[in-house]
Amino acid sequence: MKVEQIYTGCLAQGAYYIESKGEAVVIDPLREVQPYIDKAQKNGAKIKYVLETHFHADFVSGHIDLANKTGATIVFGPTAQPGFEAHVAEENEILKVGDATIRVIHTPGHTMESTCYLLSDEEGKDIGLFTGDTLFIGDVGRPDLAQKVVAELTQEKLAGHLYDSLHEKIMPLADDIVVYPAHGAGSACGKNMSKETTDLLGNQKKNNYALQPMSKEAFIKKVLHGLMPPPKYFPENVMMNIQGYESIDNVLNKGLQALDPEAFESMANETDALLLDTRNAQTFAKGFIPNSINIGIDGNFAPWVGALIPDIKQNILLIADEGREEEVVTRLARVGYDHTIGYLKGGFSAWQKANKEIDEITSISVDTLAQYLEDNPELSILDVRKESEHISEHIIGSTNLALDYINENIDQIDKDKTYYVHCAGGYRSMIFTSILKARGFENLIDVSGGFKSIKESDKFNLSEYVCPTTLL
């Protein structure tokens, strides 16, 4: 029997491929399903089931396309009500895969249909538990997401269900079972996830804060403490996963329309399309199409798209590094942004060669910022990291406006004032600056390298400019 975790770092998401005696199962697949099909074909196996642990919020699952292309049966746990053909399993139902078995364990809490799948080998020994967003390594799934879709499900009710599921369904299982969660560190589906993506259940019983002895009331309070608001695209992805969606093949076909500079310019002028430039931040700063925004593909691309582009049905025109256009369209589709309508053929260099108008963003080094601060300690510095990062340590006198909430906080920025914008490493600050530039803010200066470079620079007097804050 083969068990393989297929981990996608930019989403901090784990899909799983299980194979036994020519039959295979895929758990929580990504939107692009061909790699799973290729893997099964290479091994001479047939995909029998597509198991969904719940209706995901942070990405659009590939369950429908995978089932349509392979004839596999989509399986959800008890209480699920999908808007397409699927098998809604009963509690403790057994699914056969070759010589292996998978037992359905309904574990409501993260969502009401949340389900874990217990894998047993050919000899009947329980070896792996695929926990979805019920149990992570070092954490448990946040219980505040389903209330965004079903109003009467308060986060307190869901947290209570999660406590019961963990204590009655999961913790009684054997310590030597491997936990295979749907996410790792970096996912917005939890708050304290480990960088490790698997672990023994026994270790989690000892080390996971949420599995320590406590009352249900204490558990509810602890699990709900410190939760940040989820990205706004989450409910949209949930509904796509419940109701169904357009095939990824159609999304790619529409998005991969190559447009020369003239056609691209006409399309931009004639539609409401957002111009999305996915190149490196510093490359973007040196020259870009006016009114385009930068969200670099080599970062947490899909989550930032979801956090910053309010309308999931927004038409998008792409400016990407040549040869990476399909990757970009695919990664947009992973989080439900299916309305890419074309890309600039030849990339930004083609735009330059056509003598089209370009814009720039001023970007300075941290050493230059240090000199500016020495000459004028009253400089206006915007720190666009998360509030928790800013609280930990920051430049004295800086203002924290997290990129996550730029749409809500834009009225706090004075168009006539010059700001120096930094984040942790330079990725988020360029996103922030490009968005404001597209909205008519001309006096923002990016600080290349961000706070990491500030701390490493010998030009900064850390005791004078960097303020560590102790939380009381």
Image (spheres, grey):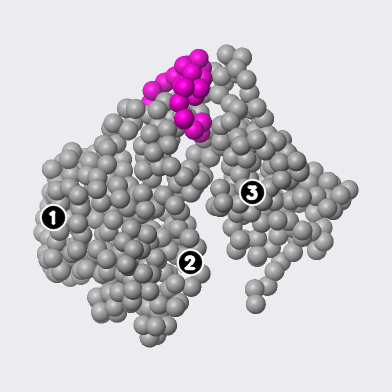
* Secondary structure of the residue carrying numbered label 3: helix
Residue type at mark 1 is His
Q: CA distance from mark 1 to mark 3?
A: 49 Å
**Residue beneath the point at 61% across and 61% down:** 387
- Of residues 133 and 314, the one nearer the viewer is 314
**Is residue 62 toward the left or the right of residue 404 in the image?**
left
Residue type at mark 2 is Leu
Q: Residue 46, percent across and down?
A: 14, 45
- Pair 2/3: label in front: 3
**Is residue 51 toward the left or the right of residue 95 in the image?**
right
* Secondary structure of the residue carrying numbered label 2: loop
**Residue beneath the point at 58% across and 49% down:** 406
* Secondary structure of the residue carrying numbered label 1: strand
Q: Residue 205, percent across and down?
A: 36, 78
- Position above or below: 175 against 447: below
Instruction: Assess disc 2: are there few (<14), some (14-19) or many (≥20) residues with their C-alpha within 10 Å of its C-alpha.
Output: some
Instruction: Assess disc 1: are there few (<14), some (14-19) or many (≥20) residues with their C-alpha within 10 Å of its C-alpha.
Output: some
The residue identified by callout 2 is 227
| The residue stretch that appears in magenta | 256-276
Callout 2 touching callout 3 (CB < 8 Å)? no
Q: CA distance from mark 2 to mark 3?
A: 25 Å
**Is residue 208 toward the left or the right of residue 82 in the image?**
right
Q: Residue 401, percent across and down?
A: 64, 54
The residue identified by callout 3 is 411
Q: Is residue 335 visible?
A: yes
**Residue beneath the point at 56% across and 37% down:** 294
Which circle's residue, 1 or 3, is located before the other in the chain?
1
Q: Is residue 16 visible?
A: no
Residue type at mark 3 is Asp
The residue identified by callout 1 is 87
- Quadrant in which the C terminus appears: bottom right
